[in-house]
Amino acid sequence: MTHDPARQLVGAALLLGAVVSLPAADDWPLFRGNPLQTGVTAQKLPDKLEILWQFETKDSVEGTAAVVGGTVYVGSMDEHLYALDLADGKPRWKYKAGPIRAPVSVQGGAVYVGNIDGVFHRVDAAKGEKNWTFKTDGEITSGANFAGDSVLFGSGDQNLYRLATKDGKRLWRFEVAGGPVLGTPAVVGGRTFAAGCDSKLHVIDLESGKGLTGVELSGQVGSAAAVGGDRIYVSTMTNQVQAVDWKKGEVAWTFEAEKRSEPYASSAALTDKLVIAGSRDKRVHALDRDKGTEVWSFLTGGKVDSSPVVADGRVYVGSADGNLYVLDAAKGTQLQKIDLGDSIVASAAVGGGRLVIGTEKGVVYCLGAKK
């Protein structure tokens, strides 16, 4: 069986009619790169990555950047959202948005991000000026996803929200009783998904906001889910990775490491054959997409809360040991290790042939090939 990520995205667009707009091939507009949250891109990066520039903020950078049209958009706990030139890292603007842990999303000339005070912002991408804000009652660490003229995100107040992009008007909210909605929602087939501390994967009708199915999971979920065909792949805080048939409403398989299993805060990347996720057991695990059996694992020097990104057969993932690792996706062998000087919980964004990632020291790095 083959699973072509590009075909999946086209298939998702067909299922949704004109609801989902696919990202440009050279951009990274969402936390995991695309509406299906797969963490996979068709872009190619240089065989050897080198640091091209770095930009220092005044606090930790824990959320993933967006890269659109030659601009890097990234939030910091120093209470600012930054727009940086991808070519040289020079700031184009900064916007006072409150302390940010969430990934940044970009669509239609606007930047979307939530903060830990529970405020969700829409900012003009060219000027860095506020369009509107929406207040929730909990911390926002979820990134945003889009469906037509609406934006979806989760909040620590136990709700998944859908707002109109034009004015921030609430279209609906879906409550996940018992805990926060931390992960960025995936969108496919007229459906969106929410999982939180109630240990269920909720399948939600996109138009009405009504819950259609609730699938019992093995534990709480603090990461984004990736969609491939009829299956959605989630990693749990109770040490498992699970594949769920979202149409049938049942778990297809569950994986747990045999030795020293630890929670997963990392979102899984989904290739044609593998599900790849980082764990707090310090390892990156690659599982057979159909069966859930382990194909390989790679040991780093620290917990792996950073979510892996796959580009051209290579895995890019940060670790709490301060290194960015480049691994062979098929074998799990190390191709490169780059010391970025401090713990990495953010995930990589790939755009314009470059990779952008932040550290807990508050430094944003851009890596590529030096001319």
Image: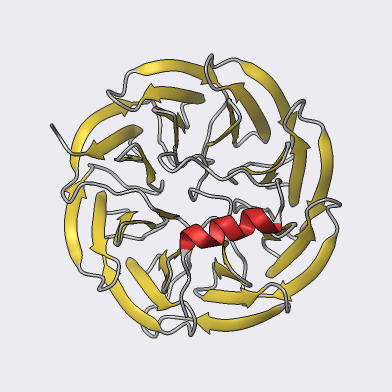
Residue drawn at the location 34% of the way across and 36% of the way down: 352
Q: Is residue 326 left or right of residue 104?
A: left
Residue 56 location, quadrant: top left
The answer to whether residue 81 shows anywhere in this view is yes
Residue drawn at the location 76% of the way across and 37% of the way down: 163
| Residue 337 position within the rendered picture, expressed as x and y whole percent measured from the top left | 18, 54
| Residue 368 position within the rendered picture, expressed as x and y whole percent measured from the top left | 23, 39
Q: Which residue, as the protein is rendered here, is positioned at the far left?
A: 371
Q: Residue 121 or 229: which is nearer the viewer?
A: 229
Q: How is the image coloured?
A: secondary structure
The answer to whether residue 267 shows anywhere in this view is no
Residue 37 location, quadrant: bottom right
Residue 294 location, quadrant: bottom left
Residue drawn at the location 64% of the way across and 33% of the way down: 117
Identify whether 146 is placed above or below 108.
below
Identify whether 237 is placed above or below 352.
below
How many numbered discs? 0
Q: Is residue 72 left or right of residue 195?
A: left
| Residue 7 position within the rendered picture, expressed as x and y whole percent measured from the top left | 52, 61
Q: Is residue 46 left or right of residue 290?
A: left
Identify whether 215 is placed above or below 37.
below
Q: Is residue 270 left or right of residue 56?
A: right
Residue drawn at the location 32% of the way across and 33% of the way down: 363
Q: Residue 166 or 23: which is nearer the viewer?
A: 23
* Quadrant of the drawing holding the C terminus: top left
| Residue 138 position within the rendered picture, expressed as x and y whole percent measured from the top left | 70, 42
